[in-house]
Image (cartoon, rainbow, N blue to C red):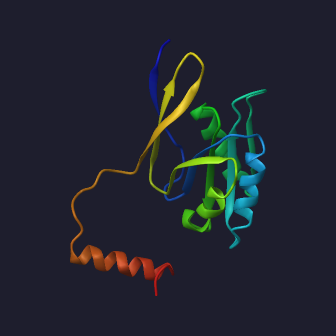
Amino acid sequence: MSLEFEVVAIEKPENLNVIIGQSHFIKSVEDLYEAMANAGGGIKFGIAFLEASGPCLVRFAGNDERLIELAKKNALALGTGHAFIIFMENGFPINVLNNIKAVPEVCRIFCATANPVQVVVAKTDQGRGIVGIIDGNPPKGIEGPEDISTRHSFLRKIGYKL
C-alpha cells in the first residue's frame, strides 16, 4: 500500500468566504442548500459535494452561477471522497455554520474562512481524503493595545458587537 500527500490550493477571489467540510450521503448537497437558503439575509452561495460511491460524481447546487462554478472547479481539484465546499457572499460563515452543522449528514467542518486556503490531501491506492487545512498565514506577533482597539472597532462596524 502506498501513501502520498498533496497540497491543493483553493482557487478563489480574495475575501470570498469558503467553507470546507465532510459529509457522507448523496442528499448532502440538497440539505446543505436548504441550510444556506434558510440562513436568510440575501446570502449568495455555490455548493459542490464529492460523492464517494456509486457514480462518484461532483453534485452541486446554489443560488449564484458564478459561485456554483467555482465550487465545482475546486471540488474536482480536491478529488477527495465525501467532502463539500461552499463559497458564499453577502454574509459570513458565522451566519450559516450552525445551520450547516445541524445537517444530519455533516461529519465535520474543516474550515470557514476568507483567508487563502490550502488543503492537505492524502492519496492511497483506494482514493483521496482531506487530512487538514492550512488557513491563512502564521502569526506575526501578539496584539497590542492599538490592535485590540482596532479589533473592537471592526466588530462594532460590522454589527457583531454593540
75 vs 35, left or right, is: left
Q: Position of residue 50 (x, y in %)?
A: 68, 37
Q: Position of residue 84 (x, y in %)?
A: 64, 44
Whether 153 is drawn above or below 122: the answer is below
5 vs 102, left or right, is: left
| Picture residue at 46% right of the left edge, 19% below the top | 3
Q: Is residue 130 visible?
A: yes
| Picture residue at 24% right of the left edge, 68% below the top | 143
Question: Which residue occupies the foreground of this view, 106 or 73?
Answer: 106
Question: Which residue occupies the foreground of this view, 45 or 56?
Answer: 56
Residue 140, by quadrant, is bottom left
Q: Position of residue 9 (x, y in %)?
A: 48, 39
Q: Position of residue 115 (x, y in %)?
A: 45, 54
The residue most toward the front is 104
Residue 54, by quadrant, is top right
Please give the count of numbered marks on the rendered protein. Answer: 0
| Picture residue at 69% right of the left edge, 52% below the top | 46
Question: Which residue occupies the foreground of this view, 105 or 96?
Answer: 105
Q: Is residue 62 visible?
A: no
